Image (cartoon, rainbow, N blue to C red):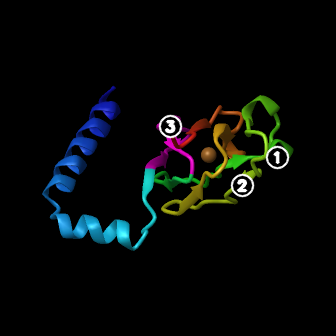
Amino acid sequence: MKYCNILILSFCLFTLISCNTNDTETEQLSENDTVQYAVTIEMTDVTFEPDHVTIIEGETVRWINTSQVTHTVTADSGLAVDNSNVILPRGAEPINSGSLAPGEIFDYRFDVPGLYRYFCVPHEAAEMVGEVLVETQN
Ligand SMILES: [Cu+2]
């Protein structure tokens, strides 16, 4: 709950900062087609925070390992002990970040809409599992 409050606070702060940014800067960003991270997910000791996010197709999710241990972002049933920890929409390629050391980042652009469920290879048994719901752009 305390963590939740920090998240909400960070979001408010971010919104505040975004509002202060002048219009020219905002236009430049969209003109240059800079990658917009729809959401950032933290990899804590044995969790993805938040563990469920919703984005629009074509958006990129960024994972940051903020813990002191190695994690992965993996949606490949061939690498899962329990197949129920992997869901891929029809036509979507398996995902595997490989080992992410503390401080490392993994970006992934979701082009196929649907529900994705992924896990962390070293912490599958600890139920380090997350979901990304990719909605169709209207
Ligand atoms: Cu892990």
Q: Residues within 10 Å of mark 2 (few under 14, many from 20)?
A: some
Label 3 and label 1: CA atoms lie apart by: 24 Å
- SS of the residue at dot 1? helix
- Determine which residue is flagged by label 1: 79
Point out the tag, 1 or 2, that comes first from the N-terminus.
Answer: 1
Residue 26, x across and y down, in percent:
26, 64
| Residue 137 covered by magenta stretch | no
Provide the major secondary structure of the magenta segment: strand
* Kind of residue at badge 1: Leu
- Residue at the top extreme? 1
Point out the stretch of residues depicted in magenta: 39-57
The residue where tag 2 is placed is: 96
Q: Position of residue 117 (x, y in %)?
A: 67, 36
Q: Give the secondary structure at mark 2.
A: strand
Q: What residue would you read off at disc 3?
A: 54
Look at the image and tell me in which quarter the N terminus lies. top left
Q: Is residue 93 left or right of residue 47?
A: right
